[in-house]
Image (cartoon, rainbow, N blue to C red):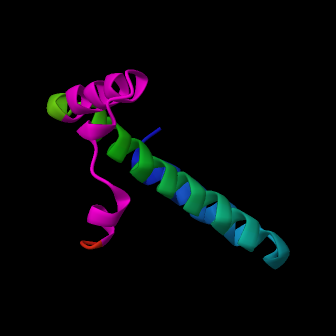
């Protein structure tokens, strides 16, 4: 089924919904749209080799209690 056909069928189905169900349909479609955006961001992060390497290093530092490898909250909050 083509995208155009899917959209046409979707609009037809929406037009037939009772008004009490339109909010539910809108909420669900909004959820799907936001979920796609979240997965896109997740995929972008997972493909960032340097960021993944930095996260692994930070996890090792936490496990080995290397607290000096991290900035204190007091120094960070000045820039927030």
Quarter of the rendering containing residue 11: bottom right
Magenta extent: 51-77
Residue that protrudes farthest toward the bottom in the picture: 19
Considering only vertical position in the picture, is 11 above or below 78?
Answer: above
Classify 22 as above or below 2. below
Percent x, y of residue 10: 59, 57
Camera-nearest residue between 53 and 58: 58
Above or below residue 41? Residue 75 is: below
- Estimate the x, y position of residue 76 in percent, counting from the top left: 29, 63
Would residue 60 be counted in the magenta stretch? yes
Q: Residue furthest left?
A: 50
Tell whether position 30 is magenta: no
Q: Nearer the viewer, residue 37 or 6?
A: 37
Q: Is 34 left or right of 21, judged from the image as shown?
A: left
What x and y, as percent, mark residue 24?
A: 75, 65
The image quarter in which residue 17 lies = bottom right
Magenta segment's dominant SS is helix
Residue placed at 40% from the left, 52% from the top? Answer: 37
Residue found at x 65% / y 58%: 28
Q: Quadrant of the C terminus?
A: bottom left
Q: Residue at x 32, y 36 (%)?
A: 43
Q: Residue drawn at (22%, 32%), measured in percent from left and top?
A: 54
- Left or right: 33 as drawn, with respect to 13: left
């Amino acid at each position: 089924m083509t995208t155009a056909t899917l959209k046409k069928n979707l609009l037809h189905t929406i037009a037939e919904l009772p008004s009490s169900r339109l909010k539910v349909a809108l909420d669900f479609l909004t959820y799907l749209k936001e979920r796609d955006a979240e997965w896109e961001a997740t995929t972008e992060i997972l493909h960032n080799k340097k960021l993944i390497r930095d996260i692994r290093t930070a996890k090792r530092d936490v496990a080995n209690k290397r607290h000096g490898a991290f900035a204190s909250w007091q120094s960070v909050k000045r820039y927030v």
